[in-house]
Image (cartoon, rainbow, N blue to C red):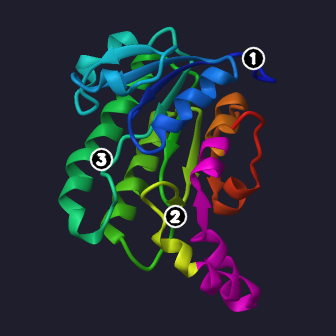
Amino acid sequence: MTHSSPRYVFVAGSTGYIGSGLIPALLTRGHKVRALARAGSQGRLPDGCEVVTGDPLDRRTFDAQIAPADTFVHLVGTPRPSPAKARQFLEIDLVSAREAVAAAVEARVSHFVYVSVAQPAPIMQAYLAVRAEGEAMIRKAGLRATILRPWYVLGPGHRWPHLLRPVYAVLERIPSTREKAQRLGLVTLRQMIGALVAAIENPPDGVRIVAVPEIRRTAVESI
């Protein structure tokens, strides 16, 4: 069971890489979950959550079903981002963020949780720009929010950056490169889910940024 007051969480991106691990963790800790899924993908959701069938790119298909959730978690995004997917970032990541923020405002949720990306960074500029715009929309809307900024989340099917661990270890020991190496460091899927659960259970007063070092430090029981 959770060590804080149980939350009622609306999750967009519920069947994705992070969402599919987050929802069981929330349910285990005693939270209620309402999961947004496209038609035909409902069967990928775990038992115990409420299913909302809708399109994350069109808030009219789900905005009336957010309440009474108090927390909105936005995990929608282009799978396996790369520089070649700049158009998808605009058509999926940006549009879904715009629709989610507007829907959250209309539903008067008390906490918006958004997975952004570590920044600044020397590569993936189109992706960074879209995620930064998502952050700006959250601030402009006046939402109380937690913005998580991972760089790469290691997990099933996402393991090749393990090869870079020795390089990161060296860069983190050098004063001139330490901050950048830590900001653009690797996190595990378990750490990411733990940081999301901690954010949901401990909403901020305003807008909170959770960067890679804090994601790594977060430890949550039952994750």
Q: Earlier in the sequence, mark 3 or mark 1?
A: 1
Amino acid at pointer 2? Trp
Amino acid at pointer 3? Leu
Question: Left or right of 185: which side holds 116?
Answer: left
Q: Residue at x 48, y 74 (%)?
A: 121
Distance (Cα) linking label 2 and label 3: 18 Å
Q: Secondary structure at mark 3?
A: helix
The residue at which mark 2 appears reads as 151
Q: Residue at x 78, y 22 (%)?
A: 4
Find residue 5 and name its label.
1
The residue at which mark 3 appears reads as 94
Q: Is residue 21 visible?
A: yes
Along the viewing direction, whichever of 69 and 209 lies nearer the viewer? 69
Q: Position of residue 192 (x, y in %)?
A: 60, 49
Part of the protein shown in magenta: 165-194
In which quadrant will I find the N terminus? top right
| Badge 2: residue crowd in 10 Å (few <14, some 14–19, many ≥20) | some
Q: Please determine whether, in this image, residue 48 is positioned above or below residue 4.
A: above
Residue 180 belongs to magenta span: yes
**What type of secondary structure mainly makes up the magenta span?**
helix
Q: Earlier in the sequence, mark 2 or mark 3?
A: 3
Q: Position of residue 120 (x, y in %)?
A: 50, 71
Which numbered disc, 2 or 3, marks the residue closer to the eye?
Answer: 2
